[in-house]
């Protein structure tokens, strides 16, 4: 497995591969993801490749000075339970520390148990909950980077 780090919007080939994976993982939202990416500031994307195939990604962006938001991530269902999500998380956190971020925050759903557990195992604390626009409860997690 190889990891590639991208700052900003990826090239068209990488973007299309990432959007295809996003559709496979979540079943929707490729066009929305592309549109939302263009609105974000100081984007960082960690991408995992198995040989030439994109098998995972983790996207985040700067929310405010010294504060990074870990927004979206996914691993191809055929490549899960191989440590790819963990590797991408660590890559994102390393990049954040090197770029002066002091905290990293993420939101997840209770139904995304593997993501919730991954975040807790990697030093995130639950700092609250909220109900999103669709009426779904979300868990807010935050980690102080050292």
Image (cartoon, rainbow, N blue to C red):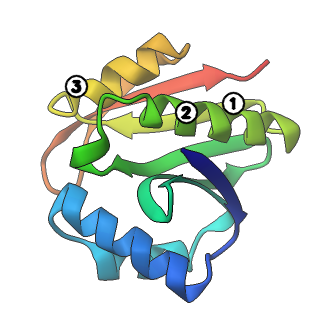
Identify whether 37 is placed above or below 49: below
Q: Is residue 33 visible?
A: no
Which residue occupies 67% across, 34% down? 93
Is 97 placed left or right of 93 in the picture?
Answer: right
Image quadrant in which you'd find residue 141: top left
Q: Which residue is mark 3?
A: 113
Q: Quadrant of the C terminus?
A: top right
Is 63 placed left or right of 114 in the picture?
Answer: right
Indicate the secondary structure of the residue bearing disc 2: helix
Instruction: Report x, y in % for residue 114.
Output: 27, 26
Q: Which residue is mark 1?
A: 103
For residue 112, the mark is none
Q: Nearer the viewer, residue 146 or 142?
A: 146
Is mark 3 in CB contact (under 8 Å) with mark 1? no
Instruction: Report x, y in % for residue 99.
Output: 85, 44
Image quadrant in which you'd find residue 44: bottom right
Instruction: Report x, y in % for residue 97.
Output: 81, 33
Indicate the secondary structure of the residue bearing disc 1: strand
Q: What whole-number distance in Å separates the C-alpha atoms at marks 3 and 1?
A: 22 Å
Q: What whole-number distance in Å separates the C-alpha atoms at marks 2 and 3?
A: 18 Å
Q: Between disc 1 and disc 2, whose residue precedes?
A: 2
Q: Quadrant of the N terminus?
A: top right
Q: Which residue is mark 2?
A: 87
Foreground label between 1 and 2: 2
């Amino acid at each position: 497995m190889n990891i590639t780090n991208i700052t900003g919007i990826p090239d068209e080939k990488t973007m299309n591969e990432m959007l295809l994976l996003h559709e496979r993982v979540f079943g929707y939202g490729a066009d929305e993801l592309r549109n939302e990416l263009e609105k974000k500031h100081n984007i960082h994307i960690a991408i995992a490749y198995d040989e030439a195939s994109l098998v995972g990604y983790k996207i985040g962006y700067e929310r405010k000075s010294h504060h990074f938001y870990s927004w979206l991530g996914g691993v191809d269902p055929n490549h899960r339970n191989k440590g790819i999500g963990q590797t991408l998380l660590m890559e994102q956190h390393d990049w954040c520390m090197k770029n002066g971020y002091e905290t990293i925050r993420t939101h997840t759903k209770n139904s995304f148990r593997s993501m919730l557990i991954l975040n807790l195992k990697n030093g995130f604390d639950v700092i609250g909950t909220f109900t999103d626009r669709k009426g779904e409860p979300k868990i807010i997690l935050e980690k102080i980077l050292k």
